[in-house]
Image (cartoon, rainbow, N blue to C red):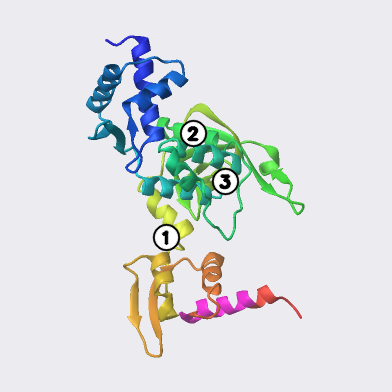
Amino acid sequence: MPNRDTKSRILQVHKILVEETDTEHYITIQQIIDKLADVGISAYRQTILSDIEQLIDAGVDIKCVKSTQNRYYIENGLFSFAELRLLVDAVEASQFITRNKSSVLIDKLCSLTSKYNNDKLSQEIFLLHRDKNDNEEIFEVIERCNEAICNHKQITFLYYEYDVNKNKILRNFGQRYVFSPYGMTWEDGRYYLIGFSVKHDKIITFRVDRMTDVEITNDVIVAMPEGFNIADYVSGIFRMYDDKPVRVTLKCRNELMKSIIDRFGEDVDVEPKKNGFFYAYVDVSVSQTFYGWVFQFGGDIQIVKPASVRKAFKEMGNKVFGDD
């Protein structure tokens, strides 16, 4: 077996190849030897060749460009540049991750590719709104929630909102919630925890980024109700369905087909009409969530029927404008 010095050298050779090479940038054996010397490791040409062979045997995709001085590079890292770009952008765009945590994550992602790609990866994407959460313990909260879900254990936690002066205030009179977590979902850029709340005596959701001081108890969770399906529940809460949906006819401008599909899926029942419109027949929970979604299109999506839903939508509009 290789001794500790050999292991240290091989790891350093791998680090040099990751940081210094890619499909457009190569390195020679002598350059590797020089860089090892910079960190106090002496090596010979044949030693480095042997190290590279061991790395290749271990699955590292190292390629050799034949010339008077052979040059080496890593062709395929753990992630391609496009994959890393996608992950970096997702971290940067995520509202629930704090600025500090985002910076740490992006630095770690950048370390997975060569230094030549670091500047490209670290360039921030342009976002119209760059609101970030300020809960620095968000990763710990997620980790504890996941652990509790996997081990079927209850958790307790504090939950906060904001007052009129934007100060954090604890809900439930500052008392801890007792909760049986069943799963988490990602909706509209935020994590939500789904489970049974002792206080509410029913299954509800909590925003993970507003949870704090999460503790895992020794108590087994309250069992899920028979037939309960998390995916169906998520659809009911976030996608305007519930146990007793109402069939609603929507009159939509043709260019809004993408919005209908984004909200209701590709299987949504639609019917083309004249003059640049189509009808969408959707099953929804008739609620403020649904009405708010319709309202955002400024009349380009209209409720046709049932008459009761159309009337309720108009009444909600009157409440928005209030008394003269």
Q: Nearer the viewer, residue 271 or 308?
A: 271
Residue 232 position (above or below residue 148):
below
**Residue at 74% across, 78% down:** 323
Q: Which residue is disc 3 drawn over?
A: 200
Residue 62 lies in the magenta-colored region: no
Residue 293 position (above or below residue 94):
below
Q: Position of residue 75 (x, y in %)?
A: 29, 39
Q: Which residue is disc 2 drawn over?
A: 143
Residue range highlighted in magenta = 302-317
Q: Nearer the viewer, residue 90 or 234?
A: 90
In the rendered image, the residue lying farthest to the front is 68
Q: Which residue is disc 1 drawn over?
A: 243
Residue 309 position (above or below residue 220):
below
**Residue at 31% across, 35% down:** 73
Element at badge 1? loop
**Residue at 66% across, 48% down:** 161
Q: Position of residue 86 (x, y in %)?
A: 42, 50
